Image (tube, grey):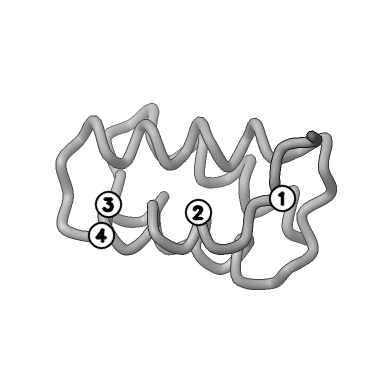
Amino acid sequence: MASARLDLGLALLAPGKPDEAAAVAAAAIGSGRIVPSNWWRASEVVAGVQQAGVAEARDLREQYEAFRPSEPA
């Protein structure tokens, strides 16, 4: 479900719906069920939302930073 939400978030960026993309990405990230190989999708949605400059961008970035796995040492 988390992967599908990230895909939906990416799809919503294309027609210029970054606020909706932020909402579905936040649900995916907050679920705690994103597998390591799908974090690139979350990163792409976060970048697209930030580029659009919507109000939700800051909160989404903070959530992304809080939940993403740390880089291997």
Label 3 near label 1: C-beta < 8 Å?
Answer: no
Labels 1, 3: front one: 1
Labels 3, 2: front one: 2
Q: Of callouts 1 and 3, which one flags the residue occurring earlier in the amino acid sequence?
A: 3
Q: Of callouts 4 and 2, which one flags the residue occurring earlier in the amino acid sequence?
A: 4
Left or right: where 24 falls relative to 1? left
Q: Position of residue 35 (x, y in %)?
A: 84, 49
- Disc 3 marks a residue whose amino acid type is Ala
| Residue found at x 36% / y 56% | 20
Give the CA separation, mark 1 to mark 3: 20 Å
Give the CA separation, mark 1 to mark 4: 22 Å
For the residue labelled by badge 4, is the local secondary structure a helix, a strand or a loop? helix
Give the CA separation, mark 3 to mark 2: 12 Å
Q: Position of residue 49 (x, y in %)?
A: 31, 41
Residue wearing tag 4: 56
Nearest to the observer: residue 18 or residue 64: 64
Give the CA separation, mark 4 to mark 3: 4 Å
Nearest to the observer: residue 58 or residue 56: 58
Residue wearing tag 1: 69
Label 2 near label 4: C-beta < 8 Å?
Answer: no
Residue wearing tag 2: 65
Residue 39 vertical placement versus 28 (above, below)? above
Q: Of callouts 3 and 2, which one flags the residue occurring earlier in the amino acid sequence?
A: 3
Residue wearing tag 3: 57
- Disc 4 marks a residue whose amino acid type is Glu
Mark 4: few/some/many CA within 10 Å (<14, 14-19, 20+): some
Give the CA separation, mark 1 to mark 2: 9 Å
| Residue found at x 82% / y 42% | 36
